Amino acid sequence: MSSIGCFMIIVVCFSTILFCAYNIFRSMKNTQSHMSARTLELNRQLFLTLTFQTILPFIMMYSPVGLLLTLPMFEVYVGRISNYAGASVSIYPSLEPLIAMICIKEFKKAFMS
């Protein structure tokens, strides 16, 4: 029963994130004619960065830990999956800033030089 509650919390959180992302994207499209080309490009880079930074925790933390907690309920042997869950949770904080360094051109130039 508690796993259903945790699942529902995650569903509500990601639904809220998707709703807000859609509204931000729609607002950016509507105000596109009032912005310079440079501002539009920066907004696109920031939106892409935030999208990847939203997806990353789901892939690196929620999914592995969720599988680690859920699979034993269905009598599925987790073996090496438990190693992946711990490793991915510990690697996640170092990957988060790399997304910004790769997606934003100015950061990428400074990072590569």
Image: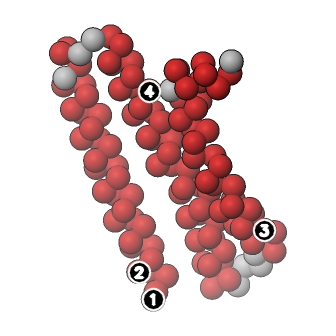
Q: Nearer the viewer, residue 105 or 55?
A: 105
Q: What residue sits right under mark 1 in the picture?
A: 1
| Image quarter (top left, top right, bottom left or bottom right) of the C terminus | top right
> In front: mark 3 or mark 2?
3
Callouts 1 and 2 close, C-beta under 8 Å: yes
Q: Nearer the viewer, residue 105 or 2?
A: 105
Badge 2: how crowded within 10 Å, few (<14), some, or many (20+)?
few
* Residue at (25, 25) in percent of width and height: 29
> In terms of sequence position, does the residue under pointer 3 or pointer 2 come before the other?
2
Give residue 5's mark. Answer: 2
Badge 1: how crowded within 10 Å, few (<14), some, or many (20+)?
few
> In terms of sequence position, does the residue under pointer 4 or pointer 3 come before the other?
4
Inspect the image, locate mark 2, and give the three-letter code of the amino acid beneath it: Gly
Q: What residue sits right under mark 4 in the picture?
A: 45
Q: Estimate the spatial distance between the alpha carbons at disc 4 and disc 3, rounded to whole Å.
A: 34 Å
> In terms of sequence position, does the residue under pointer 1 or pointer 3 come before the other?
1
Inspect the image, locate mark 1, and give the three-letter code of the amino acid beneath it: Met
Query: Which element is circle 4 on?
Result: helix
Query: Is 99 placed left or right of 41 in the picture?
Result: right
Query: Is 3 placed left or right of 44 in the picture?
Result: right
Q: Estimate the spatial distance between the alpha carbons at disc 3 and disc 2, rounded to whole Å.
A: 25 Å
Q: Quadrant of residue 82?
A: bottom right
* Residue at (36, 62) in percent of width and height: 13
* Residue at (53, 57) in percent of width and height: 58
Q: What residue sits right under mark 3 in the picture?
A: 83
Badge 3: how crowded within 10 Å, few (<14), some, or many (20+)?
few
